[in-house]
Amino acid sequence: MAEDAVDGEDVATEAGREACWRGEGVRLAPLDVDDAELMHRWRSDPVAAHEIGIWPRPLSGLRERIARYVDNQDRDDFVVLLPDGTPVGHIALADQDIVDGTADIHLMLAPEYRGKGHGADALDALVDLAFGELPMHRLQAITHSDNTAALATLAKSGFLQEGVRRSACLHRGRRHDLAVLSLLRPEWEALTRPRSWDL
């Protein structure tokens, strides 16, 4: 049975994972090498593969990559969990530059959990972590300019499109434009939604 965080304590899930951060309806638990099979399945989904611009790679290679993620001090990777412990996606704060206060956001949801608001919820939680616990000043997200679902999720969380990197991605034999979005600390401070620690 899920337990809510009390006075800053971790949130325990019935799946046996310890969640370290929360959103309104999701929890974030640290990514582990044992999550490679889940990630492999999610990354192999044709929609995700197209939007992220990847193709299926061997599971062993993904395990090695996740091991590097876990050891990398410049990124924080999480599995997005429902309150009952069901894993529904992956979210990361990558390429963290503590001096400049910048980082990139990466988000991927399992196909069956897209379009249910979990992405925006997880994004809000990660943004609160970046601005509320870390000294970040600018968060950036990059996606295909025709990825309407991602653009809507980012906009819902307060990200503003600041530009387009024209013809910056080759995928499936076509060139794609990439939209660059960002959220600055003062913009986050102006948001009226509850913060993760208030939920």
Image (tube, rainbow, N blue to C red):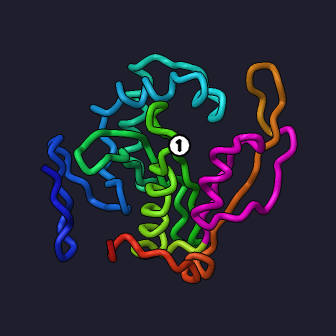
* Residue occupying the point 37% across, 70% down: 196
Which residue is the extreme one toward the right?
166
Q: Position of residue 170 (x, y in %)?
A: 78, 29
Please tell me in which quadrant of the rendered image residue 11 appears.
bottom left
Q: Is residue 74 visible?
A: no
* Horizontal side of residue 198 vs 102, given as left or right: left
* Extent of the magenta region: 138-167
Q: Identify the amino acid type marked 1.
A: Gly
* Residue occupying the point 54% across, 19% down: 56
Number of residues whose C-alpha sits closer than 10 Å to that of mark 1, classed few (under 14), some (14–19) or many (20 or more): few
* Residue occupying the point 70% across, 58% down: 181
Image: 191 above or below 68: below
Residue linked to disc 1: 115
* Horizontal side of residue 159 vs 180, given as left or right: left
* Horizontal side of residue 119 vs 38, given as left or right: right
Q: Position of residue 29 (x, y in %)?
A: 30, 50
Which residue is the extreme one toward the front?
116
Check residue 53 for magenta coloring: no
Q: Is residue 174 visible?
A: yes
Q: Look at the image and tell me in which quarter the C terminus lies.
A: bottom left
* Residue occupying the point 63% across, 73% down: 184
In front of the other: 184 or 155 = 155
In front of the other: 195 or 70 = 195
Q: Position of residue 80 (x, y in %)?
A: 37, 47
In front of the other: 182 or 47 = 47
Query: Could you say whether the residue bearing mark 1 is in a helix, strand or loop?
Result: loop
